[in-house]
Image (cartoon, rainbow, N blue to C red):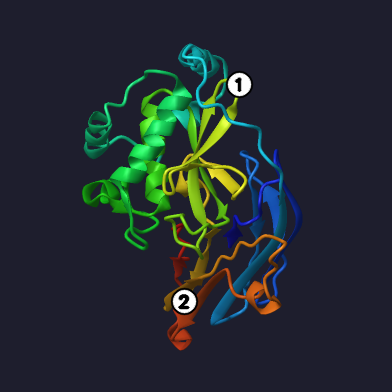
Amino acid sequence: MELRMRPRNEGYQRPQTYEVTTSSRAQIMSYRDYLGNTIDHFNIPAEHTKLTVTMTALVEMSPMLHLPDAIDPNAWQIIDRLIAQGDYWEMIHPSQFAKPTDLLVQLANEFELQRRDDPLTLLRELNSQLHQTIAYVKDKTKVDSPIDAALKTREGVCQDYAHIMIALVRRLGIPSRYVSGYLFHRDEDDSAEGSSHAWVEALLPELGWVGFDPTNNVMARERHIRVAIGRDYADVPPTRGVYKGDVETELAVAVKVRQVEDPAPEEDLLEPLFQTMLVDPEEREDRADHQQQQQQQ
């Protein structure tokens, strides 16, 4: 099994401690992929009926630099030069979950989405438009749902908001990427507390990668803890693996984010972040099934 749960160490975000444990003892190996995401990998060859993975981390979040209300309108030409000179192919072209569809084109026409003003102003507006147009409904879609599932009903979860915005931003010729992580919630947030979160980053001149959270209609700032980046969700699932056995599975997920001034009770820190229950273990066959993945809400 692979885990992408370790907070990234970069910029304003500095993990101070990190620990991952499994209910069945396993040797955990760590490595980084080409995007700098840390992946923890382990095997449990012995027969088992329950697997619990618990991750705890203490992350220092420094104040981010002030973000201007707008940037120079000439930034459109600078973006084009950046793309011509740099290696942004993967973040500018369609990907598995962030690709054009007829419904996406209809939404772009509805928003009258085209290059105008300056890129930052336009993306702020798009962030708000998506928040107002699509209703947040927990568990409305699945991890492998295409963007049309949310576009048809105008309902979805943070993963859908992120994929739709990425596909629209790439249509504008702006490199954009999917960010998986955790959010320190406030009462005014629409996204569900207790799950991992997803948002979008777009490459803008002089500002670098700027975060947008259309689910909550905010910019991704100090409350957003970055874990992994990729073209879309397919690159950064929190868990990915296989198991053998003719079984049914039940997945339980819990995510808690607190400030250090409000530490969690020890028993809360030990609640499972990922859990799968293997039912009817005596009826196993030698076949491999894909392990369920945690859905980002």
Residue at 60% over, 75% down:
271
Q: Which numbered mark, 1 or 2, is in the foreground of this view?
A: 1
Task: Return the residue found at the far right.
Answer: 16
Judged left or right of residue 57, residue 246 is left
Residue type, label 1: Glu
The residue that disc 1 covers is: 206
Q: Are marks 1 and 2 in contact (CB under 8 Å)?
A: no
Is 101 on the left-hand or right-hand side of 2?
A: left
Q: Quadrant of the N terminus?
A: bottom right
Q: Is residue 93 visible?
A: no
Judge by depth and name the residue closer to the eye, 154 or 27.
154
Tell me the kind of residue under disc 2: Gly
Q: Residues within 10 Å of mark 1 (few under 14, many from 20)?
A: few
Query: Which residue corresponds to the image point at 54% horizontal and 57% vertical from the top-left?
Result: 185
- Please give the label number shown on residue 85: none
- In this figure, what is the number of numbered marks? 2
Which quarter shows the C terminus?
A: bottom left
Asked if 287 appears above or below 80 in the picture, the reply is below
Give the Cα separation between the discs numbered 1 and 2.
Answer: 52 Å
Which of 137 and 179 lies nearest the eye of the viewer?
137
Q: Which structural element holds mark 1?
A: loop
**Residue displayed at 46% across by 57% down:** 296
- Chain-order first, disc 1 or disc 2: 1
Q: Position of residue 257 (x, y in %)?
A: 61, 61
How crowded is the residue under tag 2: few (<14 C-alpha within 10 Å), some, or many (20+)? some
Expressed as whole percent of the image width and height from the top left, the position of residue 131 reads: 36, 44
* Numbered label attached to residue 245: 2
